[in-house]
Amino acid sequence: MGELFVGERQNPFLWNTDRSLYRRVGACKPIPPGAASQHLVAFEPIPDTFALLTENVRHAAHANDSLLNCAASERTATVGMEIPRFPDGLENYYQAHVVSGAAGLTILALSIDSLALPSVRLVKIDAEGHELPVLQGMRKLVERDHPILIVETGTGEAMRLLESWAYRVERLPGSSNVLCT
C-alpha cells in the first residue's frame, strides 16, 4: 500500500530515509501529478477541509488515493471536534481538535487497525493532541509492518509508547515532528 496520513494538511512532500519521494496529500495545497505512485490513505475529519482535499486529489488525478472523511482514534466511535477561531473570527482549521463532551461537530472516528490495510511503509500523524489515541488504534499495523512514523507530538506518553514499540525516536530539527524508525 505505501502511505497513511492522519490529519496533516501542510507540506506537499516528505522524503523517506533513502531519499525516495513520498507524495503528500494536503487539503490546502494542490499536489503535482506524478509525485508518487503508491496507494495512499488519508484521514480528514473536518468536512470543509475534506472537500478541499477531495478536490485537490481529483484535480491532480491521483487514482491510488483513498480519502476518509473521519478521524483516526483508538476505537471506532463518534467523537466531538472543535474548530477554534482566529482573532478576526475566521475558523482555524489547522488547530481543529477532538474534545470530550459536547462539541461543535460530531465526527466518526475509526481505529486504523479496523481497516485491515495491506502493508504500510510510512505513516504521518498530525492529530492536534490526539496522537496517542491514533497510535493506540494502530498497534496491530505497527506490530505487523513497523512502518516509518512521522508524528507531531510533544506528549511524553506518546513518546514512551513509541519507544516501547522499539522505535528510535528523533525530534526533527526546527520541527514539532518526531521521526520514528
Image (cartoon, grey):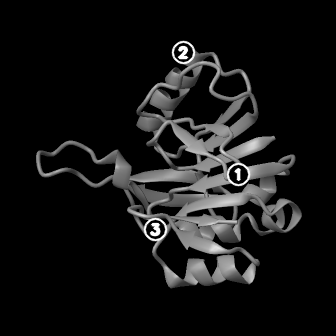
Mark 3 surroundings: few (<14), some (14-19) or many (≥20) residues within 10 A: some
Give the spatial CA distance, label 3 vs label 2: 31 Å
Q: Which numbered marker is on residue 122?
A: 1
Looking at the image, which residue is at 62% across and 26% down? 35
Left or right of 122, for residue 134: left
* Amino acid at pointer 3: Gly
Classify mark 2: helix, strand or loop.
Answer: helix
N-terminal-most mark, 1 or 3: 1
Q: Nearer the viewer, mark 1 or mark 3?
A: 1
Residue 131 location (% of width, % of height): 55, 67
Quadrant in the picture for the N terminus: top right
| Disc 3 target residue | 129
Quadrant in the picture for the C terminus: bottom right
Give the spatial CA distance, label 1 vs label 3: 20 Å
Out of 57 and 36, give the one closest to the viewer: 36
Residue 177 location (% of width, % of height): 49, 62
The single residue placed furthest to the left in the displayed view is 88
Q: Which numbered marker is on residue 59?
A: 2
- Quick check: can you spot residue 111? no
Q: Nearer the viewer, mark 1 or mark 2?
A: 1
Mark 2 surroundings: few (<14), some (14-19) or many (≥20) residues within 10 A: few
The single residue placed furthest to the front in the displayed view is 18
Residue 102 location (% of width, % of height): 40, 64
* Amino acid at pointer 2: His
Residue 151 location (% of width, % of height): 56, 62
